[in-house]
Amino acid sequence: MAKPTVHDIAREAGVSLATVDRVLNGRPGVRANTIERVNDAVRSLGYVRDTYAANLARKTQYRFAFVLPDGDSQFVDTLKLALKEAMAAQLADRVFVKVVPVQVQDPHSVVRALNSLSAEHYDGVAIMAPETPQVRDAVARLKEAGLSVVALVSDLPTSGRDHFVGINNLSAGRTAGDLMGRFVGAIPGKVLIVTNSMLSRDSIERRLGFDEVMSERFDHLTILPTIESRGDPARMEAILLKAALAHPDLRGVYSMGPGNRPLIGALRRSGRIAELTVIVHELTPLTHQGLIDYEVDAVITQNVGHLVRSAMRVLRAKCDGVAIYEAQERIRIDIVLKENLPT
């Protein structure tokens, strides 16, 4: 059976093709009862709009900004590379993306960047930043201006964002807890947790999930307070080295976010890296080599290509007013060991 066309809609609704076009594209000048008749015909016929063809005909462009942390982060570097590849693949779909770097430790820097994004120049924004009150207010302003907003990697659930693209971070933390408990075994001791900032929703949820599993099944392990680098690698390395030397019964280290370079550096300097269970997030050149060298035991990761493609698809869907295919946008949690490293 042939797919219904705009001609079928016009015939079913008893209107002209020009009227159907105005209704489908949301243009003014059509009476409310006529709009209702056209929409009834669309539903009755099961018409599915070809948004690509419609956008091409209208010369529509999708203009998206990706607000990403600035600084030394191999994970963000892999995100940018995946974004560049996705952009090249979607040029035919008229998708254009600009990366906007921000100092995520400075909420005012993030807000200034978000406030600079106007509906005149952008249709949607993907944001990877902590959920501070200032950022929530900036997201609200973006939404009021008509832009679609996606939270990337770390959620902004109270900000009014349209969608979150990333793994279930509570489950990721529980996964890390399960791996830590299994790898350490029955020997009592302490576990150290490090991250960039506990202002980030991903770190909050990962710590919560980790603690849940520890208390449920591995209560012979004592979980130490989280160490935060606050974007300062030297601070992270110094505090970690001191902690590794101060706790002779330390059994494991869990890194919840970026900052794995100072983590590995500190553990090497302490002389204890070989005896500790080290679990980190995100497969980067550094953590890949760490697995090979037996300095990292497991990497909990997510496909960065899927992340950026999903963010772009979701933003396009929001611009087009169509439904999001939830199953396609679900980001999987992957566990990488030395034995299953991708080649």
Image: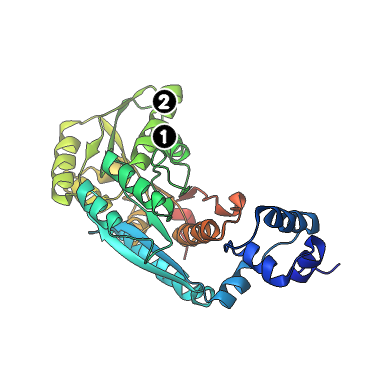
| Residue at position x 57%, y 72% in the image | 55
- Give whichever of discs 1 and 2 has the lower sequence position: 1
For mark 2, give the secondary structure: loop
Residue 144's tag is none
Horizontal arrangement in the rendering, residue 326 relative to residue 150 (left or right): right
| Residue at position x 39%, y 31% in the image | 208
Three-letter amino acid code at disc 2? Phe
Question: In this orientation, which residue lies closer to the viewer: 315 or 122?
Answer: 122
Where's residue 125, x and y in %? 40, 57
Horizontal arrangement in the rendering, residue 301 relative to residue 237 (left or right): right
| Residue at position x 34%, y 55% in the image | 287
Cβ–Cβ below 8 Å for labels 1 and 2?
Answer: yes
Horizontal arrangement in the rendering, residue 288 relative to residue 341 (left or right): left
Determine whether 63 is above or below 215 in the image: below
The answer to which quarter of the image holds residue 201 is: top left
Q: CA distance from mark 1 to mark 2?
A: 9 Å
Residue 177's tag is 1
Q: Which residue does the numbered mark 2 point to in the structure image? A: 218
Where's residue 231, x and y in %? 20, 49
Three-letter amino acid code at disc 1? Gly
Determine whether 155 is above or below 182 in the image: below
Q: Residue at the right extreme?
A: 1
